[in-house]
Amino acid sequence: MDSGLGGLSVVRLIQQQLPNESIVFVGDEGHFPYGTKNQAEVRKFVLKIGEYFEKYPVKLMVIACNTATAAALATAKKELSIPVLGVIHPGAQAAVNTNAHTIGVIGTDSTIKDGAYEREIHKIDPTIDVISKATQPLVSIVEHGLTNTPQAQQTVNEQLSIFDTHPVDALILGCTHFPFLRNQFKIKLEKRQN
Ligand code: DGL
């Protein structure tokens, strides 16, 4: 599940790794965006979708949303009868595995305010510097189908400008909508290196 289309970036990877499983995807567009809502509200949405999955029934629920993982993973694990996985621990672990000394994190207002990535990275290695930046405008670019447009590139350039003055060794795309902007990130980050 995700708040919208972003979770499809996770669905794509699950299909590659588990080609024999069927996938039920819920993009909660009725409550989109999650990133500007408070965590108690997001927890309610996640539990409701989890109850739907329980009845479906499914073998496993993936919260394919960083905002919802930060707000609701612990509660969903406790309250639901099916196993539940989130996306923050694997993302933090993958970034630490690059041996980066400084890691950048971009995500929704809610995820960055929560500090979930910083906490998770520091649980693995407390010596790593973390530079976090809320980039909520990137979410609406993706949700409104504006990827690969000049507007998308301009918004990425503006939202990531902090990394011009605070360079990082690795950048966590801490929102499942962001992989759809991969080309725009590449152009922005390559420009910085030149
Ligand atoms: N795709 C979601 C995430 O990974 C949230 C986007 C939103 O609803 O604000 O955080």
Image: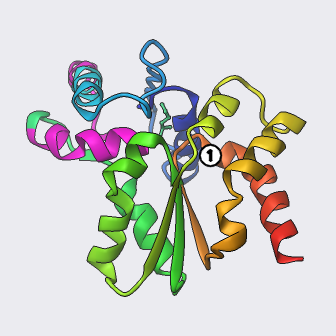
Is ligand 1 closer than 8 angstroms to the Cβ of mark 1?
yes
In the image, 57 versus 126, the foreground residue is: 126
Residue at the farthest top position: 30
Asked whether 25 falls inside the magenta stretch, the response is no
Q: Inspect this view and state whether residue 65 appears.
A: no
In the image, 157 versus 172, the foreground residue is: 157
Give left or right: position of 163 versus 63.
right
* Label total for image: 1
Instruction: For label 1, count other residues whose C-alpha is less than 10 Å away and answer few (under 14), some (14-19) or many (20+).
Output: many
Q: Residue at x 18, y 38 (%)?
A: 76
Give left or right: position of 146 versus 110.
right
Task: Magenta stretch: give its range.
Answer: 51-78
In the image, 167 versus 140, the foreground residue is: 167
Asked whether 70 falls inside the magenta stretch, the response is yes
Q: Inspect this view and state whether residue 160 appears.
A: yes
Quarter that holds the C terminus? bottom right
Which residue is identified by label 1?
A: 178
Which color scheme is applied? rainbow
Q: Residue at x 32, y 76 (%)?
A: 122
Give left or right: position of 66 versus 122.
right
Quarter that holds the N terminus? top left
Q: Residue at x 53, y 40 (%)?
A: 11
Per the image, label 1 sits on a secondary structure element best described as helix
Measuring from the top left, give residue 53's x and y in whole percent.
Answer: 28, 24
